[in-house]
Amino acid sequence: MTGTRHLVWDWNGTLLGDGRIMMRSVIAAFAAAGLPEVTIADHRKYFTRPISTFFEKLARRPLSAAEHGTLQRYFEAAYRGISANLALTSHADAVLRKWAAAGRTQSLLSMHPHEKLVPEIKKYGIAEYFLRTDGYKGSGADTKAEHLKVHLAALGYPSLDEVVLIGDTVDDALAAQNAGLRCVIFHDARNALQDLDHFDDLMVPVVMTLPEIFRHLE
């Protein structure tokens, strides 16, 4: 861990074990909207950001603004209905605690709505670990790249060589690459939003459990 001083964590699918719930919510949203049936395999094959592009890949056609809005509402309703008993990803609390105990710093950056993210991390008892928490605040691109740059600027970290982003999607890896950071991808086989082969060309380390990240933080 000698080379890395700060971790920027993703939330959904990384620290929060909600990948399967998110996929089920997309499936429910498409069914409610009367659009083509979506499977877990479809989700993992086509998942991308922006979400509008992802939805159109699943629908197999362009969607109107109204259709996108309807799908988003159905997704949010489905997610609320089945996410009440969500837990942190296995070992998440222990990994956060270990990093803090080593005298290192960490922050949280998510595309989850900011007004929902802040109370959620308090509910799970992990808010104290983060120097800064940023969710999506309703403006800017539906990809993480520009938001990561804003997040890093606000942190004012002196050397990006000492910062690593921990995420679970190609969008996380591309955001880190764009910002000049290293990245480690967490791929939870059962809950992963994307197939493993999505990462083949990105030259980023991929781990199957959170404690494995420490092997890649030198």
Image (tube, grey):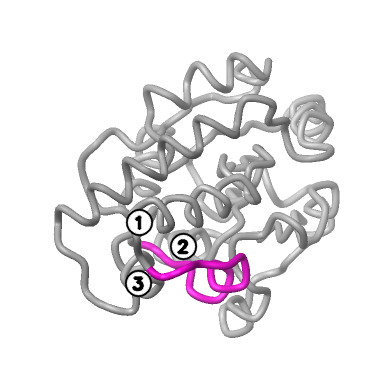
Q: CA distance from mark 2 to mark 3?
A: 21 Å
Q: Which SS class for mark 1?
A: loop
Q: CA distance from mark 2 to mark 1?
A: 7 Å
Q: Is residue 108 above or below residue 159?
A: above
Q: Nearer the viewer, mark 3 or mark 1?
A: 3
Spot occupied by residue 201 in the image (x, y as percentages of width and height): 58, 85
Residue located beneath label 1 in the image: 143
Residue 150 shows in the view = yes
Residue located beneath label 2 in the image: 171
Asked whether, in this view, residue 5 is left or right of residue 97, the answer is: left
Q: Which mark is residue 59?
A: 3
Please report contact status of discs 2 and 1: CB closer than 8 Å, yes or no.
yes
Q: Name which residue type carries label 2.
A: Asp
Asked whether, in this view, residue 140 is left or right of residue 14, the answer is: left
Asked whether, in this view, residue 180 is left or right of residue 83, the answer is: left
Query: How crowded is the residue under tag 2: few (<14 C-alpha within 10 Å), some, or many (20+)?
Result: some
Residue 156 shows in the view = no
Q: Earlier in the sequence, mark 2 or mark 1?
A: 1
Q: Which mark is residue 25?
A: none
Q: Name which residue type carries label 3.
A: Ala
Q: Earlier in the sequence, mark 2 or mark 3?
A: 3
Q: Which residues are magenta?
A: 36-49
Instruction: Tell whether position 7 is magenta.
Output: no
Q: Nearer the viewer, mark 2 or mark 3?
A: 3
